[in-house]
Amino acid sequence: MIRIENDRLLISGPLTLETIGEIAATPLCAEQPVRVIDLGEVEKVDSAAVALLLHWLRQVAQKECKLTFANVPKELHSLAALYDVADILALSANEKA
């Protein structure tokens, strides 16, 4: 479900209320700094995924790190737009094909 390759955190499977606990516990900007969260292998999302992305942005802001999201699923774009946080998450340029 989670693996780190260089500065990339790759997530696969569902990103839902049932699964985000373990994922949210992954430290960012620690010993191995993560700069990109790749969501290209995410199969399902719900509103908890939006909360998780916001959590990550708050976490890295406290550590003065930069973070971007790549390969964001269309469903997550839709939820972010619905909650009016797409600009905060900077998702507009990273839509998954």
Image: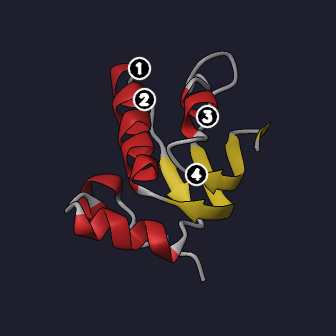
- Give the percent coordinates (x, y) of residue 56: 44, 35
Is label 1 in contact with label 3 (beta carbons under 8 Å)?
no
- Give the percent coordinates (x, y) of residue 68: 49, 51
**Frontmost residue, 47 versus 54:** 47
Residue reaching furthest to the top: 31
Q: Residues within 10 Å of mark 2 (few under 14, many from 20)?
A: some
Is label 2 in contact with label 1 (beta carbons under 8 Å)?
yes
- Marks 1 and 4, how far apart in space? 24 Å
Q: Is residue 54 left or right of residue 39?
A: left
- Give the percent coordinates (x, y) of residue 66: 45, 38
Q: Nearer the viewer, mark 1 or mark 4?
A: 4
Q: Which residue is mark 3?
A: 23
Q: Which amino acid lies under the numbered mark 2 shown in the image of this protein?
A: Val
Q: Which residue is mark 1?
A: 63
Residue 15: which numbered mark, if any? 4
Q: Which amino acid lies under the numbered mark 1 shown in the image of this protein?
A: Lys
Q: Which one is earlier in the sequence, the residue at label 1 or at label 3?
A: 3
Q: Which one is earlier in the sequence, the residue at label 3 or at label 4?
A: 4
**Frontmost residue, 60 versus 2:** 2
- Marks 1 and 3, how far apart in space? 19 Å
- Give the percent coordinates (x, y) of residue 59: 40, 26
Q: Secondary structure at mark 3?
A: helix
Quarter of the image for residue 7 reads: top right
**At 26% from the left edge and 53% from the top edge, which residue is drawn?**
88
Q: Which residue is mark 2?
A: 60
Quarter of the picture holding the C terminus: bottom right
Is label 3 in contact with label 4 (beta carbons under 8 Å)?
yes
Q: Residues within 10 Å of mark 1 (few under 14, many from 20)?
A: few
Q: Which amino acid lies under the numbered mark 4 shown in the image of this protein?
A: Leu
Q: Which amino acid lies under the numbered mark 3 shown in the image of this protein?
A: Ile
Is residue 92 among what the camera can see? no
